[in-house]
Image (cartoon, rainbow, N blue to C red):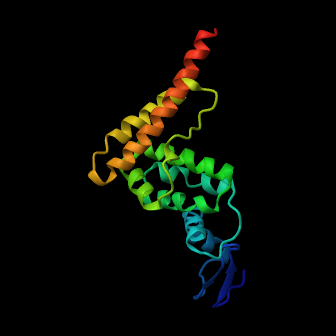
Amino acid sequence: MKTTPNIAVDLAPFGRWTLREKPRRPLTSTLGLMIRPYAPVWMLLFYVVTSAAQAPLAESDVMVLQKSAEAGDRGVVRTLFGLYPRSDGAVTEDIDMILGNVARHHPRMFLEELKLSNAGRGKCTTLELTDQTDAQVAELRGRRKALLSVTDSPLRELRDDCIRELDQSIRIFANAVQSMKGGQ
């Protein structure tokens, strides 16, 4: 493969990038080494930060961030909150599910980022578990318990709002469980 001192690489829709020095390896392997480990996260972060990004988000764009968000990567969690204005219903639901899991595993960070984003309070009640009402109740109770562990004064009001929404969802699902058991 022939290389040149300046190579323009089109990573549409994420803009143009230029390599300024002659790569020692073929271009494809050099780009693969540079981009592959960070591609999903940095591309989506770049997408959020640039106002020129007009392409609609797909569910797969959001799902590549799930592991990082659930591992407690604050930048990814902030990115997910930042994606709300650019997402449709299905993508919003995926974001809500991921953030709900973040609320259970990293409650303080979740509340801090929720407060910064001003995204609304219903971000910790969306569940991945469909048709598993007992599991839904258990998951919501786990999120409730995790959020109650946050006692920071500036986050209390927001925490209490989330707890109220969780309590309402828990009541709905618990009633559904009771009605299903009563009907058997």
Which quadrant would residue 84 be assigned to in this image?
Answer: bottom right
The residue positioned 55% from the left and 50% from the top of the image is 66
- Name the residue nearer the viewer: 19 or 58: 58
Residue 58 position in % (x across, y down): 69, 56
Q: Is residue 66 visible?
A: yes
Q: Is residue 132 above or below residue 96?
A: above
Residue depicted at x 48% and y 56% = 77
Q: Position of residue 29 (x, y in %)?
A: 63, 71
Report x, y in % for residue 63: 61, 51
Residue 145, quarter of the rendered image: top left
Tell me: 41 left or right of 71: right
Residue 146 drawn at (x, y percent) = 37, 39
* Quarter location, residue 184: top right
Q: Is residue 131 above or below residue 84?
A: above
Q: Tell me the quadrant of the picture where the N terminus can be found.
A: bottom right
Residue 33 visible here: no
The foreground one among 26 and 90 is: 90
Residue 100's place in the image compared with 21, above or below, is above
Q: Is residue 150 above or below residue 3?
A: above
In this rendering, position of residue 144 left or right of residue 60: left
**What residue is drawn where x is 60% and y is 62%?**
85
